[in-house]
Image (tube, helix red, strand yellow):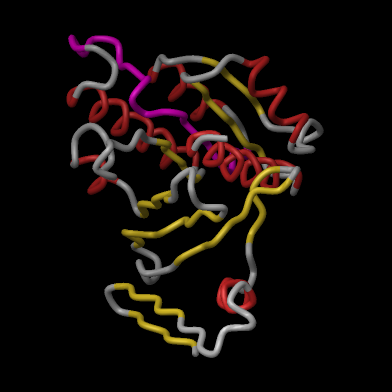
Amino acid sequence: VDRRQRQMCIRDRALGAVAKSGREVIYVSGEEGADQIRDRADRLGLADAPLLLATATSTDAAAATIVNTPNLALIAIDSIQTMYVEGVESAPGSVAQVRASAQLLIAAAKRSGASLLLVGHVTKDGAIAGPRVLEHMVDAVLYFEGDTSQHYRILRAVKNRFGPADSLGVFEMTGLGLAEVPNPSALFVGEREGRELSLIHISEPTRQAEIS
């Protein structure tokens, strides 16, 4: 399972949890077809999550749907690089299209009072693909990190207007998708049992912790 598939598991579980709580959720996919999404929902046990699904790449249509959906709580766009605004003369994924799409979707979400989740591609260097201005337009930026040689994955906040930006979430793959690891320190210490000394060092810009 590649990194994008694991990222989808976290996103789908989050959307499903909000929808099952009785709040309205819209998932707009420009990357996958409806059948692919339904198949993954079945595997993750989310087939009964009552969220609204649209496979589209028109930002104008997505924005209109957001504004006209009553009691909307959450919108997810996957991905912002596939969306396009009519009248902007450039291809989807270009600087102009990503900026215009983000502006239109953010404005629609503010009008509806709903939260907006924009999924973006990441380059080989680990940066968000497309214009950096996108990071300045949103309230929070989360990175999903890890590689195929690691069993665990990390969800890391690099920007958060509502709290600290040095928080980490650790997840592991299970038969039902990614599951939260509630106590990562205990997990990693347990893997080192039998050794004379176990040392874990976690370093973030404003946080450090050592366990021995």
Instruction: Reply yes or no: does residue 77 show up in magenta.
Output: yes
Residue 152: percent from left, percent from top: 55, 55
Q: Count the marks: how many?
A: 0
| Residue in view at x 32 percent, y 37 percent | 122
- Whether 167 is drawn above or below 106: the answer is below
Q: x and y percent of residue 183 in the render?
A: 62, 74
Please tell me in which quadrant of the rendered image residue 163 appears. bottom left
Q: In the figure, 155 relative to 168: above or below?
A: above
- In the rendered image, residue 73, in percent from the top left (x then y), is placed at 58, 43
Q: Residue at x 30, y 79 (%)?
A: 206
Place of residue 97 in the rendered image (x, y in percent of width and height, measured from the top left): 24, 21
Residue 80 in the magenta stretch? The answer is yes
Task: Looking at the picture, tell me which residue is in the foreground, 76 or 146.
Answer: 146
On screen, residue 97 above or below 47: above
Q: Is residue 50 left or right of residue 198?
A: right
Residue shown at 51% from the left, 52% from the top: 150
Quadrant containing the N terminus is top right
Along the line of sight, the residue nearer the viewer: 74 or 190: 190
| Left or right position of 190 against 136 | right
Q: What's the magenta region?
A: 71-90
Q: Residue at x 28, y 36 (%)?
A: 123
Q: Nearer the viewer, residue 30 or 179?
A: 179
Which corner quadrant of the image does residue 121 belong to? top left
In this rendering, is residue 112 above or below 64? below
